Amino acid sequence: MDEYDVVIVGGGCAGASAGFFLKEHRPEMNILMIDRLGGRKFDHYHYMCGEAVSKAAFRQLYPLTPEHVIHRITRVQEHWPGGVTMEARVIGYVLDRAKFLRSMHRRFRNRSGELCNDAAIKAEEVNGKYVIHCSSGRTVKSRYLIGADGAHSRVRQEIFRAEPPKIVWTEQYVIDKDLPKDTIQFIQGERYEGGYRWEFPAGDHAKIGFPRGTDTVTEDVLEMHRRAIPIGGLDQLTKGRCLLAGDAAAMPNALTAGGIRSALLSGKAAAEAILWDDMAIYERWWNSFPLSYPLFLRAYQQFEGLTDEEYAEAAEPFRRGTTPLNYLKARLTRPRFRDVYRAYALSVLYGW
Ligand SMILES: Cc1cc2nc3c(=O)[nH]c(=O)nc-3n(C[C@H](O)[C@H](O)[C@H](O)COP(=O)(O)OP(=O)(O)OC[C@H]3O[C@@H](n4cnc5c(N)ncnc54)[C@H](O)[C@@H]3O)c2cc1C
């Protein structure tokens, strides 16, 4: 049985980032990254995402920089019931995420990281080490295990026996629609059951998505996919020397569903905990990181119960702009939406 210092299950944003940062600091480490998808299936899986990530996310990820940028985003627009449009100037990117991940994989392999196309079907702890059984019949052993295998994480199920607090099923369509290339747009309303409809530029096309079954698109559909977004975080992110990262740990922001940033950052934080051989570093990082605040899930749950009239009432103070003064007025005059306002303000900074 092959033995490694670290096995990373999943080569998406969380797993690729963990491999990148481990090799960045300790190139001699013996690391295996396994992903069940290879070639075009891998590309297709990672294309089914809005692929939007803020510039702020990369401030904490140096020397990882945004690569394969398709669009430079400068504006976020929110359309609310009652005809209020909120706008924020936020710099970010729509990436070609599959290429971006492949670039991280390349750097991992160039430092003698091993990447293999296989699926983990079973993981167990045996005498203080992790044994991972793969669908090819291969079995590997490691001192550390990172579960970065997405929403339906096998590592989470096998080692932690835990499920995310909430799963939001979404559908996303790739259509021919000419959207502004510098803007990502969100449409709020009771029909989205706590979520929203998003409209993002995607090269010559547009990506439009919403919680499953809540809306439709009228344009010709080039591609459609359904995918789960786990939200709400987990109580326990480490067990022994096993760590969960990204969607496997239900880290996407409950309000915005943005999960690329938390996946990339959790991969980096998991790498740091392993380099220091101190798993508590990882738990501390997550508990002090604003994206872990229960406030976001509370705000999501409040949105779930709002009618269009209540959405309009919450948005009214921002009819003349999302200035700090209007924010203050909103909090003072509509105290029952206080959580929603606070979560929204934080989401501008940390949501994606
Ligand atoms: C429709 C949609 C749109 C989204 N848009 C955005 C957006 O615009 N911005 C944003 O920030 N977030 C967005 N998100 C959320 C974001 O896509 C995820 O939070 C992010 O991909 C999480 O990264 P991850 O590496 O944790 O998991 P994943 O991206 O799911 O990667 C997991 C990897 O593990 C592999 N894997 C799974 N099981 C196994 C196994 N048993 N063995 C081996 N390998 C395995 C998979 O093949 C995959 O490559 C969106 C999500 C959806 C569903």
Image: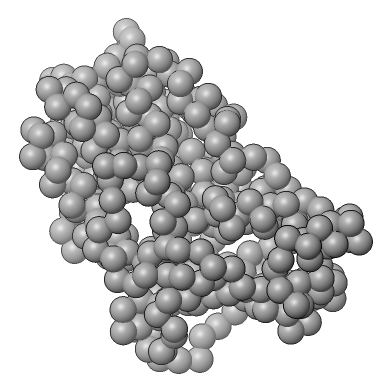
Looking at the image, residue 139 lies above or below residue 206: above
Answer yes or no: is residue 298 visible: yes
Kindly identify the residue that appears in the image at 16 percent across and 39 percent down: 108
Name the image quarter holding residue 272: top left
Answer with the quarter of the image where residue 212 lies: bottom right
Q: How many marks?
A: 0
- How far across and how far down the image is residue 22, in percent? 25, 29
Q: How is the image coloured?
A: one colour
Residue 4's place in the image compared with 76, above or below, is: above
- The answer to whether residue 305 is left or right of residue 233 is right
Measured along the vertical axis of the image, is residue 85 above or below residue 242?
Answer: below
Asked whether 253 or 160 is in front, the reply is 253
Residue at the limit of the structure toward the top, as seen here: 127
**Residue 19 vs residue 163: left or right?**
left
Q: Is residue 184 left or right of residue 178?
A: right
In this view, the residue farthest toward the right is 333
Q: Position of residue 300 (x, y in %)?
A: 69, 55
Is residue 210 in view? no
Q: Is residue 151 left or right of residue 27?
A: right
Q: Residue at x 51, y 72 (%)?
A: 75
Q: Quadrant of the N terminus?
A: top left
Q: Is residue 145 above or below residue 294?
A: above
Between 349 and 126, the residue placed more toward the observer is 349
- Residue at the spot x=48%, y=18% of the render? 280
Residue 20 locus on image (x, y percent): 23, 38
Whole-percent x and y of residue 259? 47, 51
* Residue at x 29% of width, y 66% of height: 69
For the residue pair 58 and 39, the one nearer the viewer reads as 58
